[in-house]
Image: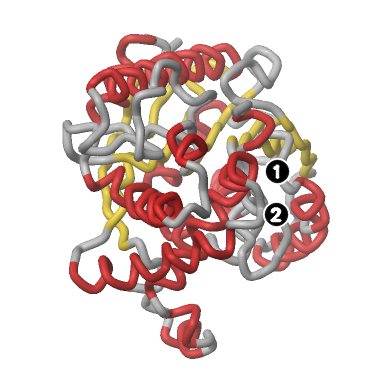
């Protein structure tokens, strides 16, 4: 599997699209609002740059794509008015792998600009938007041009499936039954990828530039912890049932592994300290229910939804399908996809009724050293 060519969220705006099934990711981003505001205030009020380079890495496509960009611009405009400074020029870079639905993203820009102008008093500084279709595991911007870099729920994705995991039979990810060499291979790949990511971003950020990263992670020191692996183990169960029934070939199952690693906060911190280019300002670990609507407190929003959108298992199934379908189609073909997710939903109905099901988020704010 060439991850850079295959990995992307489901495009478009249909019921299995990422755009339609990304409330959970928006809630995760919202949890770090205070962290972002603190970073932007410290960054902007220190130098009042005339040009502000902002990047969202792993931006995907949908309602979340410009959410952080909007928050940053509105806060900077507020600070400009408070300090009686002229608004800067905003140079916004939206990065994702080439398979991302950039067409849908750029079609939404005019609506975004209109909405932003309505929400900000007075005239906003000029905004220039750029798409960057490339892997962030390499240089993607010129040296010392970025002031603020943000990435949410992207860095758990690896640049490739780790090598040497051929004996991870019956699993599609790390699991309690995975051999030790598989766990080590996944961790080593994370270390290699994240270290390279930090090195590249350190070259691209200005001195004292800020970066906020949000990982799908785990609290446990055990890599096969249910906190990070269970959601994939249940999908593996659906696939294994189809192997037993002869719908999927066993060889296909045994050669499929998800290119993802959900790190602990200590693993993230260790790599940052080893790379050495950044000072850690804040590190937070939070939890969120698998079902994004589980603790959603907007009653008007909820009452406007069809019952199927509130049902936990349906919602989680659609969310996971929006994320995993391109990978599954590439390996198993399109014909089995509907059946896989029907079975997956049945498993989720059972498990979610009996167990506490939550994702763990590792969020970190850092500053590039002088």
* Left or right of 89 on screen, residue 81: left
Q: Which mark is residue 11?
A: 2
> Residue 312: x and y, percent?
38, 73
- Give the quadrant of the N terminus: top right
To which residue does mark 1 refer? 100
Q: CA distance from mark 1 to mark 2?
A: 7 Å
* Left or right of 287 on screen, residue 84: right
* Left or right of 56 on screen, residue 45: left
Q: Quadrant of residue 203?
A: top right
Mark 2, other Cα within 10 Å: few <14 / some 14–19 / many ≥20: many
Query: Sequence order check: which comes first, mark 1 or mark 2?
Result: 2
Is mark 1 in CB contact (under 8 Å) with mark 2? yes
- Give the quadrant of the C terminus: top left
Residue drawn at (48%, 35%) of the image: 251
Residue drawn at (79%, 44%) of the image: 126
Residue drawn at (48%, 20%) of the image: 208
Q: Quadrant of residue 229?
A: top left
> Residue 113: x and y, percent?
76, 57
């Amino acid at each position: 599997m060439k991850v850079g060519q295959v990995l992307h969220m489901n495009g478009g705006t249909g019921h299995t699209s990422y755009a339609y099934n990304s409330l959970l990711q928006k809630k995760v981003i919202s949890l770090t609002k205070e962290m972002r505001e603190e970073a932007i205030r410290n960054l902007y009020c220190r130098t009042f740059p005339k040009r502000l380079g902002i990047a969202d890495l792993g931006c995907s496509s949908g309602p979340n794509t410009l959410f952080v960009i909007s928050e940053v611009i509105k806060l900077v405009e507020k600070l400009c008015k408070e300090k009686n400074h002229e608004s800067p020029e905003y140079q916004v870079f939206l990065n994702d792998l080439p398979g991302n639905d950039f067409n849908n993203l750029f079609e939404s820009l005019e609506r975004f600009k209109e909405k932003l102008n309505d929400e900000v008093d007075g005239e906003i500084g000029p905004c220039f938007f750029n798409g960057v279709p490339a892997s962030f595991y390499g240089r993607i911007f010129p040296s010392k041009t970025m002031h603020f870099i943000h990435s949410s729920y992207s860095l758990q994705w690896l640049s490739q499936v780790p090598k040497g995991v051929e004996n991870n039979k019956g699993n599609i990810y790390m699991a309690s039954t995975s051999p030790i060499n598989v766990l080590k291979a996944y961790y080593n790949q994370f270390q290699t990828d994240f270290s390279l990511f930090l090195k590249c971003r350190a070259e691209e950020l200005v001195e004292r530039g800020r970066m906020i990263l949000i990982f799908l992670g785990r609290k446990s020191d055990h890599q096969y912890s249910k906190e990070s692996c269970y959601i994939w183990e249940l999908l593996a169960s659906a696939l294994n049932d189809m192997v037993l029934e002869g719908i999927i070939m066993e060889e296909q199952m045994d050669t499929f592994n998800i290119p993802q690693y959900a790190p602990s906060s200590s693993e993230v911190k260790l790599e940052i300290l080893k790379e050495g280019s950044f000072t850690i300002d804040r590190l937070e670990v939070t939890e969120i229910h698998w079902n994004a609507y589980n603790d959603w407190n907007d009653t008007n929003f909820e009452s406007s939804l069809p019952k199927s959108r509130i049902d936990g298992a349906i919602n989680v199934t659609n969310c996971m399908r929006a994320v995993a379908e391109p990978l599954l189609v590439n390996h198993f073909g399109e014909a089995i996809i509907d059946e896989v997710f029907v079975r997956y939903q049945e498993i989720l109905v059972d498990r979610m009724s009996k167990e506490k099901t939550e994702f763990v988020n590792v969020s970190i704010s850092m500053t590039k050293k002088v």
